[in-house]
Image (cartoon, rainbow, N blue to C red):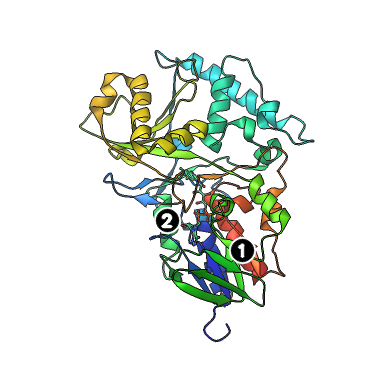
Amino acid sequence: MHGNDPDVLIIGAGCAGIAAARALIAEGQSCVVLEAGARVGGRAFTTQALGAPLDLGATWLHGARENPLSAFIGPHLDHDTVRERHLHLGERFATAAEFAAYWRAHADFEAALANSPQTPDRSVMQAAPQGGPWDATIAHWLGAQINGVELGGVSLEDYLKTDLTGPNLLPREGVGSLVARLAEGLPIRLHHVVTRLDWSGPGVVAEGDWGRLRAGRAIVTVSNGVLAAGGIAFTPALPAATQAAIQGLPMGLLTKIAFRARGADRLGMAPFHNARRAVTREAPQPMSWVFWPFGADHIFGFVGGARAWDLSRQGPAATEAAARADLAALFGPRAEAALGEALVSNWGEDPLFRGSYTHARPGHHASRAVLAAPLGEGRLCFAGEACHARFAGTTGGAWLSGETAARISG
Ligand SMILES: Cc1cc2nc3c(=O)[nH]c(=O)nc-3n(C[C@H](O)[C@H](O)[C@H](O)COP(=O)(O)OP(=O)(O)OC[C@H]3O[C@@H](n4cnc5c(N)ncnc54)[C@H](O)[C@@H]3O)c2cc1C
């Protein structure tokens, strides 16, 4: 600390920023976290708007055995132990035998990817089985519905490096509430949009319409969507390799939609069950749904990839209408009678995020390491989900990368 200047400025109070602040303070360093929004947590955000905890962003703690957030979890459930999956074939739900065939094809699809040569890097789709009866449905699920982007736009090497295996824990309070708890007591300044960062040295200076703040070093944790859109002007400009890494790691989009029950009808679905539709000519980009988590009277679902971007640009009413149509295809008119008030996330259009999480473009599998490399003798570090190779795209990856950046700059 020089005068009143903190040792480290952290830009963004999502998982990476919170983890970095905690690590720095634990090491006896001073820091200030500048957060543009009105709340902490970033893409981990729990709302009570439908009467029970509902995550509009991160939902599961994936890879729970190695996930750093597992250490802080309160009451929770391992979703894989309580969920039953239902697959709709266009006119009816699949029988147990049909579902077993689909699930075998799923395992074969993933094995084909894992056993495929990774060099030179190419798109996941180029290595994917195609033409089998379930392949289009599996590709849609692993691409748009999980990665927020169609598999044709994703680097195979990066995809295979990323670990999204279970256990997948659902905290009862919501992931956003869990993360917000971990920010309690930290020196976070809300409503502080950073528009400019001078890292020409010595030290760094952050600027916004709130004023200026100087520190020894900066850790920038804003999303790659914000960086790619030029949300922060850097002086000097970022090195070409860092700029290329940002371009190589674009944001996908996963939009979450939730509906509250109007009455007692639970659509024949038990709490935590999943339903998704097979890809058909009539439904090339279907959604997926989770019912009544922890017995709450809401359901939530996802639309991802190109269709999510398209709906996001049209606005929440268009997304809600598309979601109601998807549910009507599953349950007929009963869905409209059963489901009332809706909530739609806005990660795509929100200028503080501009997407849900990153993927690497084909040929750009090395970009995460490039982005995570410290600049200016450690004066400037990037952290966040984009910077972690193994747990890319997740809260756990963001958290670990924040801790790493704190150590590098410390
Ligand atoms: C719909 C959805 C579902 C998801 N599901 C899961 C899941 O189940 N499991 C999982 O692990 N992960 C999931 N994720 C991903 C996870 O939420 C993110 O990977 C993680 O939260 C990212 O954390 P971060 O710290 O890298 O970035 P962020 O959370 O984006 O934090 C960056 C912060 O910077 C702030 N900011 C932006 N611009 C500025 C500026 N100019 N000045 C100051 N502050 C600024 C933002 O407001 C934000 O608070 C999901 C995400 C979405 C959107």
State whether residue 41 is above or below residue 390. below
| Residue 178 badge | 2
**Which residue is found at the position 63% from the left and 42% from the top?**
162
- Check the picture and name the quadrant holding the N terminus: bottom right
The residue type indicated by label 2 comes to Leu
State whether residue 229 is above or below residue 211. above
Q: Earlier in the sequence, mark 2 or mark 1?
A: 2
Is residue 173 in view? no
Q: Which secondary structure, mark 2?
A: helix
Is residue 200 in view? yes
Q: Which secondary structure, mark 1?
A: strand
Q: Which residue lies furthest to the right in this view?
A: 119
Residue 143 % position (x, y): 57, 32
| Residue 234 badge | 1
Q: Disc 2 or disc 1, which is closer to the eye?
A: 1
Residue 269 % position (x, y): 34, 27
